[in-house]
């Protein structure tokens, strides 16, 4: 069944997700939303991993393992990022990225 | 072979005393610090005497004479297979002799200083510096290789600097200490160049290998030549430059008279008996190399020594500061020693000059330390250095008077005092090798007797001088060292040096050559008689004589304007034509380049610092677009 779906479909989906993520990261002002955009980017990459693994090396599982690692790292990253965002909120009374521009010359 | 490992303690004890006094001295009562310093040096002295006894009289003397023994050695710096620097203890006739000289004089000076420096606020500092000096000097004479000697050579220079500048609140003392340090340091540059050249050509630093008559150093003498002298000779001449700097030979002598700004015991120890003979010791240490491989370098030594001795003797006749007279006399006597080394050959009777030089070094240490300590006692009593402020002191200072008289008779070469024997050997050695230098030394012998008795009469006889308070004899702690040294001055001449300290370790027969000894005694007596006529009672004669030789007197009184020559050369020539352009180059080229680089970087950073806006999304945008552009480049263009 899955053989009927060409690889390019998966790649189109993942590319769309990737650029949606980039777009969200560059345009949203809310730090939580930006974090969600990063998750989108990561997941688009995960789709690529799995899809390439399935179509290029069906007997092997490296792509799957990579995907699992990325998910694990993403979970940890989300935890750290949210901790940072909470601290930013405590300091700036806001999670708008426009307000967090102290680190400049 | 006897075990000499314990000799390492001889220099180490003063080092520990120096560290202890230097770190804790300010919390201890002054008298106790003096006692600690003296005790430490006393132990060193006892160990030195034990070593001398064991070495010279012990059972291991064989048919090959006194050999040199390494008592102790460690590899201190292991740089490469070929370049390793050792530290150790070398025991051979001259180093053992120097041990005895240094520890004896240093011990006397320590004891004397307890009295002389009494009440001085820097008492503990003085004693810790004295210990530092003793450590450095002992390390110098015990060095197993030329590099270790260089290390201690510089340490000696530093301690001399510290002690000359001991009265650091006195500007003249500070200037003198700087002068001494810079002049000797400048000469040490020659020493370093010499060391590098010598060890490059011979592949070793080690004295035993260097001075082995069949070793590689001597064999390399036929190497490349430069300007008519072999490279080995050049290296030895450079090493001699270092020795001349420390030993105040012409033209590096200018620091020695000024060094008299230091406390008098220091002058006795450093600038009379021990440090200034380091140059003689250096030449003696490398003597086989000089004598067998580079006789031309030895000729340089002889002429420099001979010239310095008469130069200094003439100046000494006109000086009025008693310590300066003694300083020039020291220079003159060291000139004798150098000359004696210079006219010596290697082995047996030929090595007479070598033996005589070391003999004179030994006796000189005794009587010159005695003269300085005596002068110190006089200064202590009348609080002036100028001979014009003294006179008729023999009633007030009886012990000082007698011991000073003994020292003067000794230096004048009157038998049976010790210097008669050593000076006689020098004159014999000179007579057999160089008649001209022999004649020069004859005149110097007369001049020596003259200026010493001029000093003696000026201090103890002569005009009635009115003193603010009656001068009184120094305490026992100061007079006992005088008496011990006087004893040494009288009897040191009877030591059989020709069997103990010789160029090849073998003894030889030596006897007094009366054909030379009698005229030398006569000229000494003549000098004394002239001095007696001129200075015993107040008379117009000295002024008349000075008037007759007006120009000579003026030149000698101003030390032949050597200081002025140096000032002219440094200030007018080096400063104006070398230093000033270099300073300009430094400021306008090197500094400007550096400032230019810094300026460009500063300009560039101002220009681009706007990029760091602090806005996160701008960074992300730049990053993403950069990635996209790179991907496009790599996909479509490469």
Image (spheres, coloured by chain):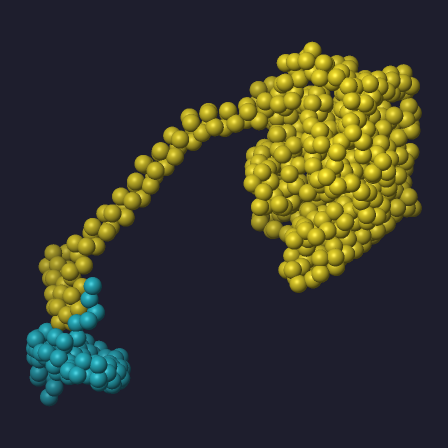
| As drawn, B286 above or below B108 | above
**Relative image position of residue B540 (x, y in whole percent):** 75, 17
Residue A30 visible in the picture: yes
Name the residue furthest bottom. Answer: A1
Residue B522 position by quadrant: top right
**Relative image position of residue B440 (x, y in whole percent):** 75, 17
Chain shown in cyan: A
Q: Tell me the residue at 84%/19% (across/down).
A: B529
Residue B333 position by quadrant: top right
Q: Tell me the residue at 32%/36% (across/down).
A: B589
Residue B5 visible in the picture: no
| As drawn, B188 above or below A60 | above
Q: Nearer the viewer, residue B22 or B356?
A: B22
Residue B291 position by quadrant: top right
Name the quarter where the C terminus of chain B is drawn. Answer: bottom left
Q: Tell me the residue at 58%/42% (across/down).
A: B170
Q: Nearer the viewer, residue B335 or B354?
A: B335
The color chain B is rendered in: yellow
- Apparent side of residue B483 relative to residue B443 in the rendered image (left or right): right
Q: Tell me the residue at 88%/47% (across/down).
A: B54
Q: Nearer the viewer, residue B51 or B22?
A: B22
**Relative image position of residue B349 (x, y in whole percent):** 85, 25
Q: Nearer the viewer, residue B574 or B96?
A: B574
**Relative image position of residue A102 (x, y in whole percent):** 19, 71
């Amino acid at each position: 069944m899955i053989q009927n779906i060409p690889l390019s479909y998966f790649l189109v989906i993942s590319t769309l997700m990737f650029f949606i993520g980039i777009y969200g990261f560059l345009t949203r002002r809310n730090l939580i939303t930006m974090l969600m955009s990063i998750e989108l980017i990561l997941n688009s990459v995960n789709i690529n991993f799995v899809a390439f693994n399935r179509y290029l090396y069906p007997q092997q599982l490296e792509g799957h393992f990579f995907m699992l690692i990325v998910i694990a790292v993403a979970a940890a990253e989300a935890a750290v990022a949210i901790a940072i965002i909470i601290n930013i909120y405590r300091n700036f009374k806001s999670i708008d990225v426009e307000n967090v521009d102290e680190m400049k010359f | 072979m006897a075990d000499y490992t314990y000799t390492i303690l001889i220099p180490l004890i003063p080092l520990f005393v120096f560290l202890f006094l230097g770190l804790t001295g300010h919390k201890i009562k002054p008298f106790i610090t003096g006692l600690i310093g003296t005790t430490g040096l006393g132990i060193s002295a006892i160990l030195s005497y034990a070593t001398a006894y064991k070495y010279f009289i012990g059972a291991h003397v064989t048919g090959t004479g006194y050999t040199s023994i390494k008592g102790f050695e460690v590899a201190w710096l292991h740089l490469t297979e070929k370049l390793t620097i050792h530290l150790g203890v070398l025991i051979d006739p001259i180093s053992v002799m120097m041990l005895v000289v240094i520890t004896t004089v240093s011990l006397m000076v320590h004891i004397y200083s307890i009295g002389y420096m009494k009440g001085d606020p820097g008492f503990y500092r003085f004693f810790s510096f004295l210990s530092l000096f003793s450590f450095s000097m002992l390390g110098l004479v015990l060095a197993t290789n030329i590099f270790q000697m260089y290390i201690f050579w510089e340490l000696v220079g530093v301690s001399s600097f510290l002690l000359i500048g001991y009265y650091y609140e006195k500007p003249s003392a500070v200037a003198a200490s700087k002068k001494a340090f810079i002049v000797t340091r400048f000469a040490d540059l020659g020493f370093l160049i010499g060391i590098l050249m010598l060890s490059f050509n011979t592949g070793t630093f080690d004295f035993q290998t260097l001075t082995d008559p069949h070793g590689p150093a001597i064999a390399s003498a036929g190497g490349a030549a430069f300007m008519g002298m072999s490279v080995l000779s050049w290296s030895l001449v450079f090493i001699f430059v270092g020795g001349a700097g420390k030993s105040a030979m012409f033209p590096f002598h200018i620091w020695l008279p000024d060094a008299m700004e230091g406390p008098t015991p220091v002058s006795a120890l450093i600038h009379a008996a021990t440090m200034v003979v380091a140059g003689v010791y250096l030449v003696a240490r490398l003597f086989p190399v000089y004598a067998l491989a580079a006789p031309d370098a030895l000729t340089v030594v002889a002429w420099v020594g001979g010239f310095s001795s008469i130069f200094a003797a003439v100046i000494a006749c006109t000086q009025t500061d008693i310590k300066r007279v003694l300083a020039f006399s020291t220079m003159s006597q060291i000139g004798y020693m150098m000359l004696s080394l210079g006219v010596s050959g290697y082995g047996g009777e030929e090595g007479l000059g070598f033996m005589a030089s070391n003999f004179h070094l030994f006796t000189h240490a005794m009587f010159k330390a005695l003269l300085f300590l005596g002068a110190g006692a006089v200064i202590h009593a009348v609080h002036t250095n100028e001979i014009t402020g003294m006179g008729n002191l023999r009633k007030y200072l009886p012990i000082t008077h007698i011991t000073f008289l003994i020292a003067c008779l000794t230096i004048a070469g009157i038998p049976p005092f010790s210097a008669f024997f050593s000076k006689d050997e020098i004159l014999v050695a000179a007579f057999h090798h160089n008649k001209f230098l022999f004649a020069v030394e004859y005149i110097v012998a007369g001049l020596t007797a003259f200026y010493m008795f001029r000093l003696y009469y000026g201090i103890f006889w002569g005009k009635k001088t009115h003193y603010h308070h009656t001068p009184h004899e120094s305490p026992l702690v100061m007079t006992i060292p005088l008496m011990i040294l006087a004893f040494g001055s009288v009897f040191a001449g009877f030591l059989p040096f020709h069997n103990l300290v010789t160029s090849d370790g073998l003894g030889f027969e030596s006897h007094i050559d009366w054909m030379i000894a009698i005229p030398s005694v006569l000229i000494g007596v003549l000098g004394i008689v002239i001095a007696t006529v001129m200075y015993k009672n107040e008379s117009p004669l000295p002024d008349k004589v000075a008037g007759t030789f007006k120009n000579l007197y003026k030149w000698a009184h101003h030390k032949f304007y050597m200081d002025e020559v140096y000032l002219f050369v440094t200030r007018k020539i080096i400063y104006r034509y070398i230093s000033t352009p270099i300073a300009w180059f430094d400021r306008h080229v090197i500094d400007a380049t550096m400032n230019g680089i810094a300026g460009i970087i500063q300009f560039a950073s101002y220009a681009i610092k706007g990029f760091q806006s602090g806005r996160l999304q701008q960074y992300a945008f730049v990053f993403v677009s950069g990635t996209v552009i790179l991907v496009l480049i790599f996909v479509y263009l490469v």
